[in-house]
Amino acid sequence: MPKLYFLGTSNAIPDEHHENTHMLLVGEKRVVLIDCANSPILRFKRLGVDFNRLSDLILTHFHPDHVSGVPQLLMNMWLMGRRLPLNIYGLHHTLDRIEGLMGFYNWSEWPDFFPVVFHRLPAQEMGSVLECEEFHIFASPMQHFIPNIGLRFEFLTSRQVVTYSCDTEPCPQLLRLASGADVLIHEASGKIPGHSSAAQAGQTAAKAEVGALYLIHYPTGQFAVGDILSEARSQYEGPVTLAEDFDSLSFE
């Protein structure tokens, strides 16, 4: 039974209870990390997920709160003796910069380093990211400061669908990506360029006719503002949940 964990739910500035937004999809044969703000080894341990099972890493865009943990993630796995390949998916813009970043660490000369396979995704709507027996993941470009993707997870046994907006302003591509989804996981950073407010997340959820809305990537700690749940509910009549670190969704 696939399970999606919220490893972090804060926007770019975390607090002691909320890590930067990233998620983990755990299936029988594939374990997929969505973004990597910090090395997630301790979060895997808290969830009881074997760190060595990580098979795939999807990077939505090259901003520090989404990719800054990649070098430490790769180093940790190498030092722990990993031998299996790791697949990394993202747009050309993202993966070119990840390779450049790792080049500064001289990773090509790390002895006995495990294989890393880069999968450069085309900047097209509903492009296939990966498919296995349990789920199919698609990506569409979103509207942010830099090239960025939102994701759609289609679970093949339950026929359930989850869409993740990632960082984006309201845009037609997101409406199409989220259309009819059982769950929309939508950022709520605020009504600022490149992002969306909770009210805008609610509007998108209503227009896309999704079954439920989860707010993520929201201001936390001293930067938390207002009642974002009420804000979203003013625009969307379905159930609205504020995602918290270590919450999960199951897909039977």
Image (cartoon, rainbow, N blue to C red):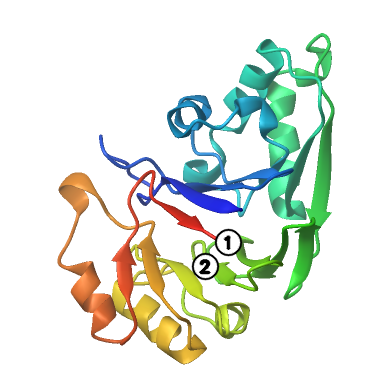
Q: Is residue 176 visible?
A: yes
Depth check, front residue: 136 or 201: 136
Q: Which residue is mark 1?
A: 252
Residue flagged by tag 2: what amino acid is it?
Answer: Ser
Which residue occupies 15% across, 66% down? 226
Q: Residue 21 in the image: state x and y as whole percent.
A: 44, 49
Q: Residue 182 in the image: state x and y as whole percent.
A: 51, 76
Q: Is residue 243 above or below residue 173?
A: above
Q: Is residue 110 above or below residue 33?
A: above
Q: Is residue 30 left or right of residue 178?
A: right
**Of marks 1 and 2, the one in the foreground:** 1
Q: Which residue is mark 2?
A: 165
Numbered disc total: 2
Q: Residue 55 in the image: state x and y as whole percent.
A: 73, 38
Residue flagged by tag 1: what amino acid is it?
Answer: Glu
Q: Quadrant of residue 195?
A: bottom left
